[in-house]
Image: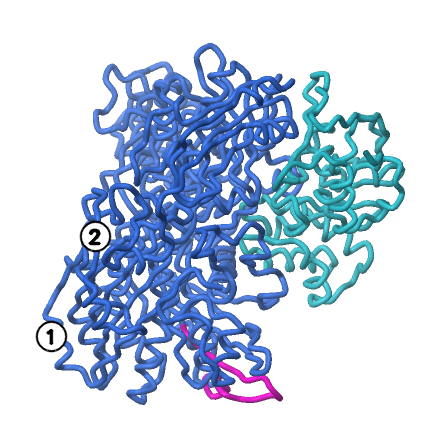
Amino acid sequence: MVDISQNNILEGTTRRNFIKSVIASASVVSSSAYLFRSHGGSKVWAASSGTVERLISLKVNGQTRRVEVLPQDTLANVLRYKLGLTGTKIGCDRAECGNCTVMIDGVTNYSCSTLVHSVRGREVTTIEGIAPKSGGLHPVQQAFIDELGPQCGFCTPGQVVAAVSFLQRNPKPTREEARSAMSGNLCRCGAYNNYLNGVMKAAGG
Amino acid sequence: MSYKLIGKNFTPSDLEAKVTGRAKYSEDFRAEGMLFAKLYLSPMPHAKVVKIDVSEALKMKGVAGVLTADDLKEVPPGGNPILTNEPHFVGAPILAVAAVDETTAAAALDKIKVKLKPLPFVTDPMDSLYPGGSNATRIGNVVGAKKKLKEHKWSAKDFAKAGENKLPLGKAVDEWTYGDIDKGFKDAQVVLDETFVTASGSHQCMEPRSSMAYWQNGKCYVHGSVQSSSFTFPFLAKAIGVKPENLVFVSEYCGGGFGSKAYYYPSMAIPPYLSKKLGRPVMLRITRAEEYYLGAARAGFQGRIKIGFKADGRISAVDAYIVQSNGPTTGFADYKNFGNAVSVVYQPENMRWRGIPVLTNTIPQGAMRGPGENQTAAAMEPIIDKAARKLGLDRLAIRRINAPDKDGKFGQKRDPFTSAYQKDGLDIGARKFNWNKKKKLSGNRNGSKVIGVGIGQAYHAAGSNGFDGLVRILPNGKLHIHTGIGNLGTFSYASTSRVAAEVLGYDWKNCVIERGDSRKHLPWNLGQFGSNTSFTMSRTNFVAAQDAKQKLLEIAAMDLGGDPENYHLVNERVVSKSSSSKFMTFAQAAQRAIQIGGKYSGKWEKLPKELNPMTKKAVEGVAGSGLIGVAKDLLKKDGVAPALCTGFAMVELDQETGKYEILEYLGVADCGTVMFPDGLGAQMHGGAVMGFGMASSERHVYDPKLGIPANRGLYQQKPPTYLDVPSKLEWAAVNKPDPQSPFGSRGVGEPPLGAAASAVASAISDAMGGHLFNRIPVTPDMIVNVLSGQQQSHKALQVNTQ
């Protein structure tokens, strides 16, 4: 078995690398990468694959969190099931929809397709870390409310994180630039027009 | 008429939770000792389970147990079972296994041996209707008008007569006629006879239908993703075999439904059963691939329509036939909705409609946003264009002359409408889109790119009646509005609640909406589907608030003297009409209601008998807490409330690649009074985006040899992205009140999709000089085939193709 926790090629994981690594870890089952190991206070059972958990430190929303993870654990699953950060949504679990978007060192990333080992020592920002610690909302969040961005709301956390990250890189974008930057985030309610209005409003446009 | 709240924008109270990630969807809940379930799905489109051996799996450490169809009530073919020993589609759940984590549960699935005996299957209704063709079930292939499963075949002669490119017109199982179609066709100047196909497609909600359940002290607690809170409740209770008082159902947020989560659906019942059997909480996460298998789909059509047009474009006769690819269950009445939608949008002088829902071993099909009506729009509108070209008429004019207004009629029985202003919708749209100028751009070229413009129209019924409303005024003066509709993202849970506040003259900040959890004493409401809430629940909240108002007036008269009619409501006070210094606040009145008791505080000796048992239970739950307003909607409704939409689109089609870009889109709604302008705009835009997908890219594909669906990921049935839609969309509304809705509103959730899909289909046809594909979606390869004179890779009637 390859211990991918020691495998530095996963820094800046691509989807292909991710898949290769998971296959290498010999623990993915049949059709589904949509698997995780629960935490829930229970002592973890040895899975059939014989993989073991390792205790690692993650920097999430400015805090250092100690967490036991498996080699094949994705960032999305660890956030949702081991750190209680359920604002990050899993819509497809295969880097198609962007509902699980988080920032890693300020750059947007699909957390469903990011192995948690690859983000050790890096700054992870989830939807829970977007609003200012002093209270209130981030301008993007406020603009999304003002422009009635969300409909069902399931893609909204990902849309917010994508917009925040984009505006950090490009504080005064054109609408076309915003449209391109946001295009990795699907919204089945079709609220693109309203989200774009929100991005432009947050940019002061 | 100017209102305090109706027609004004506001901020729905759940928005902050949505933008901060605090909104909890069903997969966001945890329970101590929670197990995780995985499903064993049928790899065959139709089979019989011969043997299941779970012994190896149960020996695994961490595996808690298995649930099979043998643990559940048997469901006959045609039903929609929770688990089954006779799967009728690839992906049908055969069993569920629960373990301490998903990895273990999935590993356990690999150890379970399921022996299946393959049975005959069919994916194309034509194959099943052919003499000797396979049936999707042991019993038959058609669910008739009375829902009895039976075998139905056409004759070989029917097929031979039609030839390859026309839908055979064999015997139907459902049909109706009004007028005299033979006479109608005689009156016609132009008669078209078109055969068409509309593809089946998935809802593709961003949130897969995960659910979690646990039992405590004999009560079952379920967290589910569903569009409707109250309406789901009795069906869920029945499915899991508990009395309503022993079910707690939490459904505060729904991450997209579009009909596929209208109310109870079978996979929701798996965690409750597993949890009961194993004595631990169970979470069932549905994967994206599973969502495609068991998450329902829009029914596909193979249709044929003969239409007669008079010289002025008026439709004198329609003879329509729809074969619906139904999936293996009773499905939904899309095919019937075709007939009704045509009767509404085009008001034919004479019409016959015929149809057959044919069972197929494909994904179970259910209602998807405008089920039937939106397929109708996408198929029909380009055909209307063809007639306009033949008659030399303007494409707007031919729609206008047929469009329904207040004298329009519905369906076979020619029922009246509560109101309808489709002609106004067309006119408003034509002005705002600048149709007369834009239509001249048609055919303009820029290199390999050519411009096309189009118009689309769509309909859906927009309201029901007979449900209950419940409001409370508490001693702190706040108004609590209890609503049992869901939170699908249309915000109608809030906009219809504002009706109660409007009646009582409340400041919106003093109002609280109680929703999303059966412990919140929810009244019997219709679900958030069928474009109905803005009509139906405006009425329930209106009558409940009227009841509260009457009680406020009576309490004031009791305490301050005079008759109730001597008082009126001003700024959350009951004030004497003759002396403004003589008043009591709503807070005081609520306090008095508690003291007086009886009907005022909901403590009837016998509750009004017309109330639904669920509402009665809700009243009992809140009795004594304040002034209770509760009533059943018995207001007049003597017609069909319609939702009508018009779409105007301009596309630029690249003749070399077959790709097209939607340059501009305007949608116009006829939905009565606009209650919440921003909310309506969001629906008009969002529906349009989904319509663009229907027109261009979304469809199910099956391997006809193996019955296996190809769609497992979003990319195989691509929903539109930011880059597939214009960066700015436009909308408008007729905004004329419906006289049978308290503040004039009708619903409109569904037709924005059909209007957009059909406007784009019309525009593509226009860009290609009027070529009629008679097929939805229109994909680039189909366009290139036409432009290069190649044959299409599919036959005219072929469904479920690439």
Is residue A148 a member of the stretch shown in magenta? Answer: no
Q: Which label is found at residue B182? A: 1
Does label 1 or label 2 sit earlier along the sequence? 2
Q: Which chain is blue?
A: B
Chain A's colour? cyan
Residue B116 x %, y %: 43, 36
Q: CA distance from mark 1 to mark 2?
A: 27 Å
Check disc 1 and give the amino acid type: Asp
Q: Chain of mark 1?
A: B
Tell me what residue is drawn at x 27 percent, y 61 percent: B322
Position of B570 relative to B710 (above/below) = above
Span highlighted in magenta in the image: B438-455
**Residue at 66%, 53% in the rendered image:** A185
Specify the quadrant of the image occupied by residue B564: top left
Helix, strand or loop for disc 1: helix
Same chain check for tags 1 and 2: yes
Tell me: B289 left or right of A46: left
Q: Quadrant of residue B670?
A: bottom left
B444 in the magenta segment? yes
In which quadrant will I find the N terminus of chain B? Answer: bottom left
Q: Which residue is mark 2?
A: B152
